[in-house]
Amino acid sequence: MVRERTRRDFLVLAGKSLGLAALSSTTVASLLKNVEAATKTVAHLTPEEAAINEDYWAIIQNSFTVTRGIINLNNGGVSPSPRIVTEALVRYIWQQEDATAYTMWQILEPQSETIRTGLAELFGCDREEIAITRNASESLEILLMGMDLKPGDEILTTTQDYPRMLTTLRQREKREGLKLKLIQIPIPPKTSTRSLPHLKKESQIERA
């Protein structure tokens, strides 16, 4: 049996996984140590207190290499990678360039099973339940394509669903005779003073 995983367990295991990746790189190890040290400084705080600790979040912010001149609000499809990930990626690319075929098929490819085992431990499941895909969209497409639906079944979603997912659902609709129903969500969303009591109160004060 797999016991319920807590957020603390998840972070501990994630730290161990990153630690293994950092063993072969001084730069990556240094980045990880900074984050670990910062996390220890807020370990005794409540979530609310940690959320407003600016010193801690400054270190987390510096763990990313994004420009400080633009605030990135699009983290859904193209979120920036932490520096520790970027450094590891660059390191592996150079390693591959040294001996391309040998590195790809004799070193990196066998490691995929090691990674799958580590991910299974991280998420508290069996390794056979883990599939490594190219990105989140591909993962979601596999799930949507694998749902047991029959001709005439209805799929209910909204116009704000991710475009790639709507394309997948429309494909199944045409191929298998399913019925896709989209709930129209207005853009921008319509606000009502009935749902915003504080605005209604301010409006009454203005009229007075």
Image (cartoon, rainbow, N blue to C red):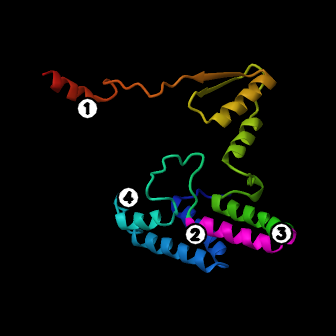
Q: What residue is rendered at 82% in x and 65% in y?
A: 109
Q: Residues within 10 Å of mark 3 (few under 14, many from 20)?
A: few
Residue 164: x %, y % from top left: 67, 36
Q: Earlier in the sequence, mark 1 or mark 3?
A: 3
Q: CA distance from mark 3 to mark 4?
A: 45 Å
Picture residue at 37% right of the left edge, 26% below the top: 191
Report the amino acid beneath label 4. Ala
Residue 15 bears which disc, if any?
2
171 or 100, which lies in front? 100
- Tell me how far mark 1 sits from mark 2, CA to CA: 44 Å
Q: Give the residues in magenta.
A: 83-102
Q: Position of residue 170 (x, y in %)?
A: 72, 27
Q: Quadrant of the N terminus?
A: bottom right
Which residue is denoted by mark 3 in the rendering?
100
The earlier-in-sequence mark between 1 and 2 is 2
Disc marking residue 51: 4
Q: Earlier in the sequence, mark 2 or mark 4?
A: 2
User: Dot 3 lies on which element?
Assistant: helix
Q: Earlier in the sequence, mark 1 or mark 4?
A: 4
Q: Is residue 125 left or right of residue 74?
A: right
Reading the image, the residue beneath label 1 is: 198
